[in-house]
Image (spheres, grey):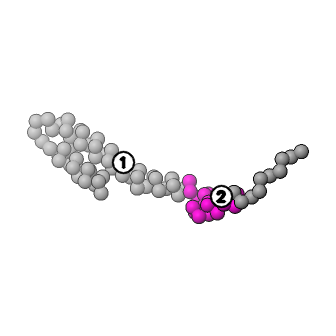
Amino acid sequence: MTGLTTAAGTLPLIYSSGAGAEPRASIGVVILFGVVTAVLVTVLFVPTAYALIARGSGSPGDVARKLDLEAAKPPAAPAE
């Protein structure tokens, strides 16, 4: 939502005319594409990366059970 309002706020900069409009338009284009890129990375890349990384870990409850089982094991006897 914030990205959308920021992108919409750059449109007057991009389409303005008059004195000093050219530098403002270039700043508006940079801000617009930066915000669009940030939103796309946040919406597409981060969940995809998380799904790929989290495949092998299991649920938090599964990890907690494994840790509890590991803690309940008696210590291993030293090898002679």
Identify which residue is drawn at 56% across, 57% down: 54
Crowding at dot 1, Cα within 10 Å, few <14 / some 14-19 / many 20+, comes out as few
Q: Amino acid at mark 2?
A: Leu
Instruction: State the residue position of label 2.
Output: 67
Is 42 placed left or right of 67 in the picture?
left
Residue drawn where x is 36% and y is 52% of the image: 39
Q: Secondary structure at mark 2?
A: helix
Residue 69: percent from the left, percent from the top?
A: 69, 61
Is 64 situated above or below 3? below
Check the picture and name the quadrant holding the N terminus: bottom left
- State whether residue 23 is above or below residue 36: above
Q: Position of residue 53 (x, y in %)?
A: 56, 53
Q: Is residue 31 left or right of residue 21?
A: right
Q: Position of residue 70 (x, y in %)?
A: 70, 57
Q: Secondary structure at mark 1?
A: helix
Disc ID at residue 5: none
Residue 63 within the magenta-colored segment of the rendering: yes
Q: Are marks 2 and 1 in contact (CB under 8 Å)?
A: no
Q: Can you name the residue that lies furthest to the right here? A: 80
- Locate the C terminus and report the quarter of the image it occupies: top right
In the displayed structure, 38 sits above or below 47; it is above
Q: Which residues are magenta?
A: 53-70
Residue furthest to the left: 18
Task: Name the residue that disc number 1 marks.
Answer: 37
Residue at position x 51%, y 53% in the image: 49
Q: What predominant SS class does the magenta segment belong to?
A: helix
Q: Is residue 51 left or right of residue 70?
A: left
Give the class, few, some or many, for how many residues have Cα within 10 Å of label 2's Cα (few <14, many ≥20).
Answer: few
